[in-house]
Image (cartoon, rainbow, N blue to C red):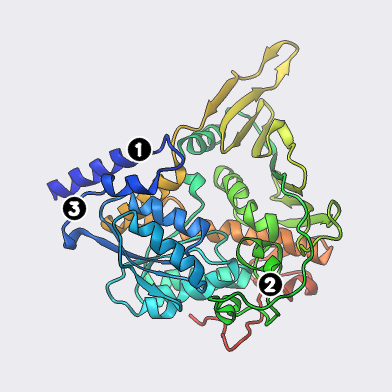
Amino acid sequence: MHSRRNFIKESAATVAGLTLTSMLPLELFASIRKKISPNDKINVGLIGVRGQGFSDLKSLLKMSEVNLIGICDIDENELNKRKNDLSKLNIANPIIYRDYRKMLENKDIDAVIIATPDHWHCLQLTDSLSAGKHVYCEKPLGNSIAEVQVMLKAAERFGKAVQVNQWQRSEKHFKDAVAYVQSGKLGTIINTKTWMHSGSGVLPVVPDAPVPAGVDYNMWLGPAKNRPFNINRFHYEFRWFWDYAGGLMTDWGVHLIDIVLWAMNVDVPQSVTAVGGKRLFPDDARETPDYQSVVYDFGHFTNTWDHYIGISNGQYGRSHGIAFIGMNGTLVVNRGGWEVIPEKDKDKPRIEAVPVIKLSDNGMDLHAQNFIEVLKSGKLDQLACPIQAGAKVAINAHMGNLAYRTGEKIYWDNAKNKFNSDKANALIKPTYHNGFAFPKV
């Protein structure tokens, strides 16, 4: 036990030393990893090997006890790229899977990373839990309210650790900002604001095309509606189509609205209204809106969400952020840092200003470290972002989209598990296609 405690401390120090660099050359990974007894290794598998999935894996591999068993993807081209990248980490022969269900049959795997498009999260998480695996799942937790709810039930039934990768919860400056809000110094908070102004541009319409060589497109579609292959719906761009995701509302909204729910200690709003549409790029390929404004009424305060695609100038001079507006002052926080802007009576500030306190650590690394420490201790209540927190904000984000898509002010009834709107209720649970069935737990 003594040596294990020392190892945990050494691992923490190693990770802390890496947090000042946002990128670490793959060639250096092998040099920071120590030899660990097989009995102390935690064996992981990665489902979805592109950008975010491989970033998650790299954060985990900074801890020497993490041992990669296999990688899984529907794109042979991406698998070959990652095999080459992994060889630079002295990981020469990971098992290659094209079907995640085969990976889950491997009894040696303790935990899986799920970094696939949103429409796959629900099936892969529930299947992973039923196979006895712990899960590190990308956000948003699910692609619909019903999926999120059944994922929660699965986590409760199987008792495994589920960390949702809302990694801002592991960064010191976000934790400090939340603590300041909860201290009461801002006075009565009547409004919070969340926003993302993305400077990305038009997504040109392109014709359908043959499936690229090496891609198992049927498996990529999974439970989504069967459609011809189109590059605009594939890989990164999937997030702009309702079949697979929820646009910026669920992509960035879950990160930012999560901080409001956490700091204000709230769950489900009393009502949600939204406006928006494809106003900046009306003829591009996206289905999801390039402008969306949502009002969440929690009774004693409201939260607003605003996003733009094509406009990068945001509120308080920040392209993205969260603002807590109180009687005594406003706290503004984003991934760069946080500050407090006092209200004034004539020239006298009601509270002391807090100049910008900048980011000082690497949230993704610390979030991964927290997950591994919980797997060692078994203390699920110490997860930085347990499935309950990921579920709460995913449901809020989906409510924002449902208010937009129905054009109605919607009210949620917890007891009946439905809205006051037939249109919104019709969108709570997706229809699964291609032989895949909605999970039963």
Residue drawn where x is 55% and y is 72% of the image? 120
User: Looking at the image, is mark 3 or mark 1 earlier in the sequence?
Assistant: 1
Dot placed on the residue nearer the N-terminal end, 2 or 1: 1
Q: Position of residue 366 (x, y in %)?
A: 40, 45
Q: Which mark is residue 16?
A: 1
* Residue marked by disc 3: 35
- Pick the front one: 276 or 92: 92
- Left/right placement of residue 411 relative to residue 152 reads right
Q: SS for tag 2? A: loop
Q: Are marks 3 and 1 in contact (CB under 8 Å)?
A: no
Residue at 57% over, 76% down: 213
100 on left or right of 299: left
* Left or right of 317 on screen, residue 130: left
Quadrant for residue 93, please give it: bottom left
Number of numbered labels in the structure image: 3
Residue lying at the far top of the rendered structure: 347
Viewer can see residue 47: no
**Earlier sequence position, callout 3 versus callout 2:** 3
Residue 354 is situated, as x and y percent measured from the top left of the image, at 57, 22
Q: Give me the disc on residue 243.
A: 2
Count neighbours of disc 1 (C-alpha within 10 A) and say few if under 14, some if 14 to 19, many if 20 or more.
some
Residue 381 versus residue 331 in the image, above or below:
below
Which residue type does callout 3 highlight?
Lys
Where disc 1 sits, the SS reads helix
Q: Amino acid at mark 1?
A: Ala
Front one among 100 and 387: 100
Q: Is residue 137 above or below residue 74?
A: above
Q: Residues within 10 Å of mark 2 (few under 14, many from 20)?
A: some
Is residue 96 visible in the rendered structure shown here? yes
